[in-house]
Image (cartoon, helix red, strand yellow):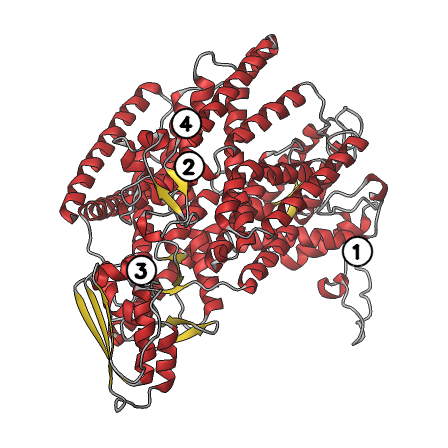
Amino acid sequence: MSLPPPPPPAAGDPVTPEDSLGSVTPEDWATGPPLQAQPLLRQEAKGKEEEGEETGVQGAWGKGTAEQRRRGWGEAAEAAAAEEGQVDAGGAAGSASPAGAAGGGREGWRRLLAWLRRRQPQCCPCAAPLPRSAAHCCHGGTKMAALAYNLGKREINHYFSVRSAKVLALVAVLLLAVCHLASRRYRGNDSCEYLLSSGRFLGEKVWQPHSCMMHKYKISEAKNCLVDKHIAFIGDSRIRQLFYSFVKIINPQFKEEGNKHENIPFEDKIASIKVDFLWHPEVNGSMKQCIKVWTESAMILMNVYCNKILKPVDGSCCQPRPPLTLIQKLAACFFTLSIVGYLIFYIIHRNAHRKNKPCTDLESGEEKKNIINPPVSPLEIFLQSFCKLGLIMAYFYMCDRANLFMKENKFYTHSTFFIPIIYILVLGVFYNENTKETKVLNREQTDEWKGWMQLVILIYHISGASTFLPVYMHIRVLVAAYLFQTGYGHFSYFWVKGDFGIHRVCQVLFRLNFLVVVLCIVMDRPYQFYYFVPLVTVWFMVIYVTLALWPQITQKKANGNCLWHFGLLLKLAFLLLCICFLAYSQTSLMFRNVPKTSAPSFPDFPDCQINKKGAFEKIFSLWPLSKCFELKGNVYEWWFRWRLDRYVVFHGMLFAFIYLALQKRQILSEGKGEPLFSSKISNFLLFISVVSFLTYSIWASSCKNKAQCNELHPSVSVVQILAFILIRNIPGYARSVYSSFFAWFGKISLELFICQYHIWLAADTRGILVLIPGNPMLNIIVSTFIFVCVAHEISQITNDLAQIIIPKDNSSLLKRLACIAAFFCGLLILSSIQDKSRH
């Protein structure tokens, strides 16, 4: 006999779970916990374990240790899922959704409600751990809310997985490509007309043509373009203003002198350039407003005439698509063969699967015994990975080389940088979970750290915030923090594991460099162009050589004799000495007040002059190192990047050594919820850390000159990094939680950093990719969604190929390394041939 139903709610009354789910029957009261209660039970069991129930006493769910109870619950859950048809073909329990668990959606939720009502009150399954004083029992409404929160996230993950997101991104790319192709055929491929006829203003005076980017010409570029040319401006006072703007691009010191109502000549004898203004006041028309815009930028005329000659990367207006190089053609053939080979392999495999498919016995009506599918062969994984990679590289090429999609210039405003920062901060705080371990800089925490830093760097790049000096200095600290983690992570691995084998080295080098090598081939860019990867690669090799050279000192060896700690410190001191030698023996960088045209210059050192080669330049100018570290024929860019963060990797190694030594001697308290030190020491260190963090921010915000700030950055960046680490890890409650949102991005941070060059930004990071013109907000949303999906897929492809190309067997690995060496030798030869043909 069922319970009487409750009266219907009034119009203003809140709707209760019973109103929407129906009445609860005695059968509902008698049944066990439904599948929807699994997250709650697991969290309660975990809480019991943390309270000290690892002994064999009677617990809430039976006798035995917490591990035994978890194992028993897992087996019971799998059995229940199997009864409900939730176990897949491989035997693993699938996601139990409300629609399919415990006898159907509505029925399952009603059973969950009955089960919750009959249980004794228990502590709330809050998303974040509560203090012990506040961890008291609470009412069922809070419990239902917390459970609904967990189940809601599970439902989102079930119906919108990463796989479905990638399929949606693929469909979006195909539709956008078709639309842009149709638009090109309708409007034509000539973007010169957009310079004057179509566009919008970014701010007050910055003109943004429709679908293309304007290049801002420097004096040297303008002279190279206009050498041996004679240009005339004919008109009245409006054309005269355009003449003055144009001449000042060539010679900024040119003054507006003489009688304005007569002809005005200009000549640069060194560059053989003549520009004349011919006074003809009768030339007039209805172009007053357009002329006013032109006088703000004579750059429009320079882009119309010079883009086809100089072909600047960030000047896509009036510039045709670059021709394919020999290496690009060979890469296209390789990817095409991979796609065809995988399709053939897939068809053959599918036909074989159909032949082996079990048939039904007509007499008994039963199917024959299932045949176990054979494991996926390495060849199939290899072909599938390069098939997907070929399609992805085609998208890269369409975005940043084929001129299929549009590009726009960046324009910085404070709102375009800080509003997205606040948005991702809210998302990061919302998606927080308990960490599996509470050690300093545990895996979840470092992934979280890399994730939010990468998102901030992405926003910094797309908003063009490098023009705002305080933001620039803080971003430099984030890049330094990545390198700090490089020193900390690799030192910790070699020190604790003592694994100096070649397999480990090859795995790390492959994962770091695979995508960049492919992009160098497909996008026709030098290795140094993707500067961060050469930076972390070189520093990894420095760490490996430092620790692998005789004597190899590991933690296990040092525990037996404390003198080995002193030996390791000597190694670190020698490394620091080598860094200082390379930095200060390089006498080629002299900062003087010289004209920018007299010598090559760095992007952030505008007054940088080259005198003579130093030790650093001599080393990295040697062939074949020069092929990796030269950019535009010199190593100046590589020197700037290395010098800017030259000490931070050493700081990371030293921090790892000190931390592991303190941990080994049990000086640190790394238990769940416990502060890292005693209360007095923890409070003192927290105070010092907060003051140091704010002091650096105030100093960075008060910087007046980028070059001077860059000079101090290598020595002071570690202050804010260490302050952040202490603030994040000293409080036990802060060390016990992490943001799963940021950690997810942190696992693909390297791919995000590299992919942004071509499929989120444009013109090699100088502009913004436009997939949906006319709606900047929607364009950012769509391009970001596709960009993140592509980065995640490339991360998976890299991991799959790393297992095949870098085997654990040493003999097989040496053979693969020989093949890789032959590949790079061939690539060097083809690159040399290609360079000669260009010259």
Residue 143: image x %, image y %? Answer: 77, 51
Taking the spot 57% from the left edge, 51% from the top edge, the residue there is 703
- Sequence order check, earlier mark of 4 and 3: 3
Label 1 packing within 10 angstroms: few (<14), some (14-19), many (20+): few
Q: What residue type is labelled 4?
A: Met
Q: Which residue is disc 1 drawn over?
A: 141
Nearer to me, 746 or 612: 612
Disc 1 vs disc 3: Cβ atoms closer than 8 Å? no
- Sequence order check, earlier mark of 2 and 3: 3
Taking the spot 43% from the left edge, 74% from the top edge, the residue there is 201
Q: Which residue is disc 4 drawn over?
A: 541
Q: What residue type is labelled 3?
A: Ile
Q: What element carries label 3?
A: helix
What is the C-alpha distance between the residues marked 4 and 2? Answer: 10 Å
Q: Which residue is disc 3 drawn over?
A: 219
Image quadrant in which you'd find residue 141: bottom right
- Sequence order check, earlier mark of 4 and 2: 2
Report the side of 169 relative to 618 (left or right): right
Taking the spot 28% from the left edge, 27% from the top edge, the residue there is 816
Nearer to me, 832 or 814: 832
What is the C-alpha distance between the residues marked 4 and 1? Answer: 56 Å
Q: Which residue is disc 2 drawn over?
A: 535
